[in-house]
Image: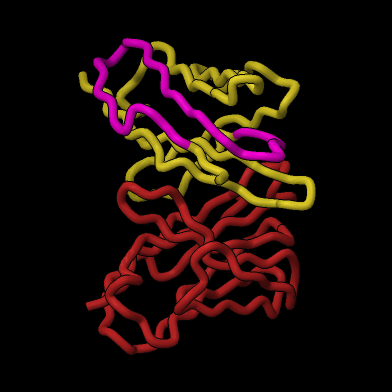
Chain colours: A yellow, B red
Amino acid sequence: KNQVEQSPQSLIILEGKNCTLQCNYTVSPFSNLRWYKQDTGRGPVSLTIMTFSENTKSNGRYTATLDADTKQSSLHITASQLSDSASYICVVSATGGYNKLIFGAGTRLAVHP
Amino acid sequence: EAQVTQNPRYLITVTGKKLTVTCSQNMNHEYMSWYRQDPGLGLRQIYYSMNVEVTDKGDVPEGYKVSRKEKRNFPLILESPSPNQTSLYFCATSVAPYNSPLHFGNGTRLTVT
């Protein structure tokens, strides 16, 4: 069964600290993996997309990694800011006769001053 | 400015009273989709459309209808809403959904009593 699991469910960190969010997937055939940021009351916004051949991609203070062998991805946030408080959603795209986007349930991050 | 506009943002209605949630985009994207988001669950796809007059069911289509008469609009219709359709709804568009980011609207929070 195609699944995307994220951990932790929620996380609290202090402003200025780093954190790492995890995404494990069992999706086949794999096409790409995306990370989205969803502010409270808003729609998700794309942070990164990584294909099979990419193992790291950055967007400002956000760095995503992908290990296609172990089917794991992480999103690392550096020097967190209050505005990083949001839910982070991992999405895996399956293609090749089975086009589908599989969404994780998200990790809710709270950054406290 | 690229936009996906949903209306209304908030809606409270009663069981059985037909309603329509509108979605409009100005990016000329062929792909449009509707999702619902419930606590603890990932975004679940209701219906999607690959082009004008081309629509297909997603994972949770029961109780919903859609139409795609023109490229920019993709309304979601609940003919006889029930309390289990209380949820946060998102419209999303993409130039190529399985290889490019989704662009989400800001959501419609629906309560059915």
Is residue A32 part of the magenta span, yes or no? yes
* Residue furthest front as drawn: A1
Judge whether A20 appears above or below B58 on screen. above
Give the image location of residue B76, x and y in percent.
51, 74
- Residue closest to the eye, B44 or A15: B44
Location of the C terminus of chain B by quadrant is bottom left
- Residue closest to the eye, B79 or B6: B79
Give the image location of residue B54, x and y in percent.
73, 73
* Residue at x-position 28% and y-position 16%: A15
Helix, strand or loop for the magenta stretch, by majority: strand
Q: Is residue A109 left or right of residue A55?
A: left
Is residue A9 part of the magenta span, yes or no? yes
Number of numbered discs overlaid on the protein picture:
0
Q: Is residue A81 left or right of residue B69?
A: left
- Residue closest to the eye, B7 or A6: A6
Q: Is residue B35 left or right of residue B108?
A: right
Judge whether A33 appears above or below B18 on screen. above
Give the image location of residue B7, x and y in percent.
44, 69
Judge whether A47 appears above or below A61 on screen. below
* Residue at x-position 51% and y-position 45%: A103
- Residue closest to the eye, B17 or A69: A69
Give, as a single range, the part of the protein colored magenta.
A5-33
* Residue at x-position 64% and y-position 62%: B32
Judge whether A55 appears above or below A87 on screen. above
* Residue at x-position 63% and y-position 16%: A56
Q: Quadrant of residue A20?
A: top left
Give the image location of residue A79, x and y in percent.
38, 11
